[in-house]
Each structure stands twice: as C-alpha cells, then as structure tokens.
Image: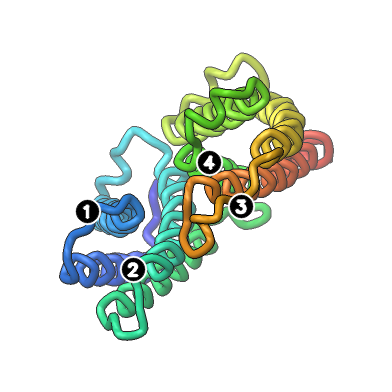
Amino acid sequence: MVTLDVRTLVVRILEVVLTCISFSLVASVGHSTDSFWTWCMFTWCFCFCVTILILVLELTSLSEKVPISWDDFTTAFAMLATLMVLAASIIYPVFFTCSTCGRQIGATVTSCLAFILYAVEVGLTRAKPGEISGFLSTVPGLLKVLEAFVACIIFICLDYNHFSRFPGLQWCVAVYSICFIFALLVIVFTICRLLALFPASFDKVLTVCNVLAVLMYITAMVIWPLYSFRNNPRPSYCQNLLCPWDNLVVITFMTSFNLGTYLADTVYSFRLVFFISRS
C-alpha cells in the first residue's frame, strides 16, 4: 500500500517548479551543441518529467497498481536525481555562467535549490531504523545507486584510443563494467521485485559481490594512474581549459571515490549478515 506523505508531496512539487525554471532559463538563453550543456538540460528535463509522473501516479492512486516496488523506485530516483542535479549545478556555472549572465546565474541558483530538495527527499524516503521498507530505501540500497552513477561518470570520461593501448587499463575498464552491471542488476531486480530469482540468500550474494568489487577496485586504483600518467604529463595547451588529459584525473578520482563507496557498502553488508541477522 503506497502512503502519501504531505512533506514529501510538498518537496516534490517544489522540485518540479525549480527544475522547470532551470531548464526554461537555460533554454531562453539559446541552444548549444556542447555535450556539457546537453547533459545539464537532459538532467533538468528528465528530473522534471519523472517527478511529475510520480506526483500524478501518487495523487491518482495509480501507483498502487504499478507492478513494481514503488518505494524502491521513488527512493532510487530521488537518489539518482540528487546526484544528477548536483553534477549539473557544478558543471553549468563552470562552463556557461559569467558575472553579467543573469539568466544563467538564475538557472544555477534554482538548480542548487533543486539539488537540496532532492537530497531532502532522500532523507524523507530513506528507511528509518526498525522500519520495514524496500532494499533501495536502506543505506546499502542508496549506495548501490551511488556506485552505478559514479561508474556512469567514469564511462563518459573514458577514451577508447587511450585505454586500448594498455592491457592494464583494459582490466580497469572491465572492473568498472562488471561492478556497474551488478549494481544495475540489483537496482532493477529490486524495483521489479525479482530478488527471489537469486540462487542464494540475497544478503550473502550481495556481501560476496561487494568484497569482490572492493578487491577489483583496489587493483584499478593502482593500475589506472600507473598506466595513465606514466610518461604522460599534462599538455601545455591544457593550461587554461579542460582537455582529454583531465578526464584521466576525473577517472582516477572517481575510481578512488567508488572504492570508498564499495568499502562502506561492504561494511554495511557484513553488519547486516553477521550481526543484525544473528541478533
């Protein structure tokens, strides 16, 4: 049974308003073919449309008839929207805002406010201690969404011409891909209520996979910078602008960030399997 919380309802209405203002202000400035501009516009439009869809389904009680885990879906979307809008709120002002660009500054402000609201929604929909809820409403579930999102950023920054030259870097790409696929499967299986298809206890499968992911990411954390930056200093033409070399730094940072995320996920999984389940 889907229950409608007034606080969550108000937050979602404000999210719709702010994301709508953001992409409207940016669209009024003019169109750009830059990939970063496209990403920001997609983020605001996507979050606007999905949030409206959620509101309509909940207000008409149609969400009760949707054959998915509604709590898991809304929580996963809130987490994803938080990360996407955060990225847009950082990227857009860096590349497209100036001291005299009023509409661009306005779009940045409303985007930052939308990010805060989506983060608040994550806090409102997250499962509280002792509360019975879907997996994606728990901390490990939210971490799975974060892991998948960070992997997507890594994929965006990858350059085939760079990693195809070194078997070590190809291994790193395999690590990112395997871990991303598993995180995505967990999210999809949870939302579609298919966890019963796992051949063993879901908690134990999750723990084993998290341990393997940590070990694999440790190797990537060592190998990626070793092969990427050895005899490869930052080119002189990159002094005042972003260039492909900077993507290597982004991937290195995101690899270390995701390693920390998987470590936290593993700790929660061990706590769930070996402590809470036996208490």
- The label shown at residue 154 is 4
Dot placed on the residue nearer the N-terminal end, 4 or 1? 1
Contact? badges 2 and 3 (CB < 8 Å): no
The residue indicated by pointer 2 is: 96
- The crowd level at tag 1 (other Cα within 10 Å; few <14, some 14-19, many 20+) is few
- Above or below, 17 against 100 in this view is above
The residue indicated by pointer 1 is: 60
- The crowd level at tag 3 (other Cα within 10 Å; few <14, some 14-19, many 20+) is few
Residue type at mark 2: give it.
Answer: Phe
Q: Residue at x 49, y 67 (%)?
A: 120
- The crowd level at tag 2 (other Cα within 10 Å; few <14, some 14-19, many 20+) is some
The residue indicated by pointer 3 is: 131
Nearer the observer: mark 2 or 3; the answer is: 2
Nearer the observer: mark 4 or 1; the answer is: 4
Q: How is the image coloured?
A: rainbow
Residue type at mark 3: give it.
Answer: Glu
SS for callout 4: helix
Residue 134 appearing in the image: no
List the single residue furthest toward the top.
199
- Using the numbered discs, state the Cα–Cα distance from disc 4 to disc 2 in whole angstroms: 23 Å
SS for callout 2: helix
The one nearer the camera, 169 or 193, is 169
